[in-house]
Image: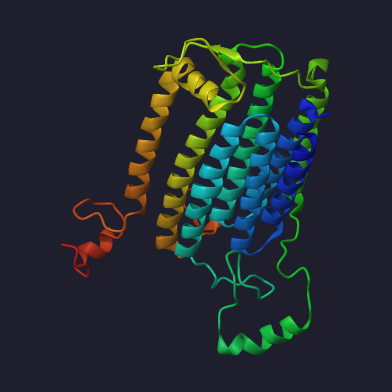
């Protein structure tokens, strides 16, 4: 029997895996990839809640709002990746590296 | 649905492991793709087929191609780390005559961990602590979260289509039901997201463009000032 708690735990697992990736990688492109994984985990949690409330007798808007917000998260993620990759390309053009530590002029 | 969920979750975790451990960035991107396909299967197991298709189209289709393009634009293969292995993006070692013998000897000594990133303890502590906290919160959820309720037979629809009588029955998760939620429930958010994507397109073009003639402070402005650029 498929439980909501199992699916939520999968989402938490993927989210913390993405968090580990963001913290451990040094290449900015790979950090952005792990960020996408975190957003994807949030999507799984949203769809789980959507399915949960559909099984509890919610109306059409309430039970589908989770899927709607998943679509919103996808759109925002696409915009975020576009801007982030453009920034990485701009930094790479100046520094000739995609290392996150290379863009540390604002430190101190 | 149970079997589909288990297989998809396994695929998801496997792709995540590849993403986190591979030193080669293209392999890591492949792991991310596998994880995206796995989560599309999870969406399908949760009776959300439209979201599953959108996941494959947007994430696995568009985002992965964009990442691959930028990986090719920013070729950082010349960076060697302490082991003498090319850095994060390195697919092949860079040819340097002096280093050839050293790398050959390193290749003779078979090292299975050569292409695997070693775990970073501090990041692992943070991630595991986060996972423990969230797992405790999930464990403490009320008992109504112990099982999914039965799906409703369908929702009443007031969508008017010519030739079809009103009051159709929309099943949960169908494209019609999702679009009804978007266009009747949250139309303002939908329009604002289109503005956001428009602004993101403009911003990405502005940021990644090479020359901005006549705009001081843009990239390569110094080169234009010294006259080495024929963009004038």
- Is residue B171 among what the camera can see? yes
- The single residue placed furthest to the left in the displayed view is B232
Viewer-closest of B107 and B163: B163
Quarter of the image where the N terminus of chain B is located: top right
- The single residue placed furthest to the front in the displayed view is B163
B149 horizontally vs B213: left or right: right
Colour mode of the rendering: rainbow
Q: Position of residue B26 (x, y in %)?
A: 59, 62
Snapshot quadrant of residue B97: bottom right
Quarter of the image where the C terminus of chain B is located: bottom left
| Residue at figure coordinates x 75%, y 18% from the top left | B150
Viewer-closest of B61 and A45: B61
- Is residue A23 among what the camera can see? no
B85 horizontally vs B163: left or right: right
| Residue at figure coordinates x 59%, y 89% from the top left | B98
B9 horizontally vs A98: left or right: right
| Residue at figure coordinates x 35%, y 37% from the top left | B198
Q: Position of residue B158 (x, y in %)?
A: 48, 11
Snapshot quadrant of residue B81: bottom right
Viewer-closest of B183 and B133: B183
Viewer-closest of B1 and B210: B1
| Residue at figure coordinates x 79%, y 39% from the top left | B3
A55 horizontally vs B228: left or right: right
């Amino acid at each position: 029997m498929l439980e909501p708690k199992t699916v939520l735990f999968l989402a938490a697992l993927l989210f913390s895996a993405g968090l580990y990736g963001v913290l451990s990688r040094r290449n900015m492109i790979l950090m952005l990839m792990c960020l996408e994984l975190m957003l994807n985990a949030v999507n799984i949690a949203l769809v789980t809640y959507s399915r949960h409330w559909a099984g509890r007798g919610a109306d059409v808007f309430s039970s589908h709002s989770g899927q709607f917000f998943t679509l919103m998260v996808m759109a925002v993620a696409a915009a975020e990746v576009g801007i982030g990759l453009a920034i990485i390309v701009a930094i790479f053009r100046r520094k000739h590296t995609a290392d996150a530590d290379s863009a540390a002029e604002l430190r101190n | 649905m149970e079997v589909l969920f288990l297989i998809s979750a396994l695929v998801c975790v496997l792709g995540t492991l590849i993403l986190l451990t591979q030193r080669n960035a293209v392999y890591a991107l492949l792991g991310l793709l596998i994880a995206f396909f796995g989560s599309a299967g999870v969406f399908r197991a949760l009776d959300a087929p439209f979201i599953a298709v959108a996941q494959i189209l947007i994430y696995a289709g568009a985002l992965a191609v964009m990442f691959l393009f930028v990986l090719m634009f920013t070729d950082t293969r010349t960076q060697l780390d302490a082991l003498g292995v090319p850095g994060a993006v390195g697919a092949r070692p860079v040819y340097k005559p002096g280093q050839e013998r050293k790398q050959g000897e390193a290749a003779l000594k078979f090292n299975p961990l050569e292409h695997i990133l070693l775990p970073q303890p501090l990041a692992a502590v943070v991630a595991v602590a986060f996972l423990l906290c969230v797992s405790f919160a999930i464990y403490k959820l009320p008992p109504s979260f112990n099982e999914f309720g039965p799906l409703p037979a369908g929702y009443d629809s007031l969508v008017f289509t010519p030739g079809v009588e009103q009051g159709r029955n929309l099943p949960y998760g169908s494209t019609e039901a999702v679009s009804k939620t978007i266009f009747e429930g949250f139309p303002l958010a939908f329009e604002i997201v289109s503005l956001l994507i428009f602004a993101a397109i403009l911003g990405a073009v502005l940021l990644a463009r090479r020359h901005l003639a006549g705009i001081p402070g843009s990239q390569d402005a110094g080169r234009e000032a010294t006259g080495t650029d024929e963009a004038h």
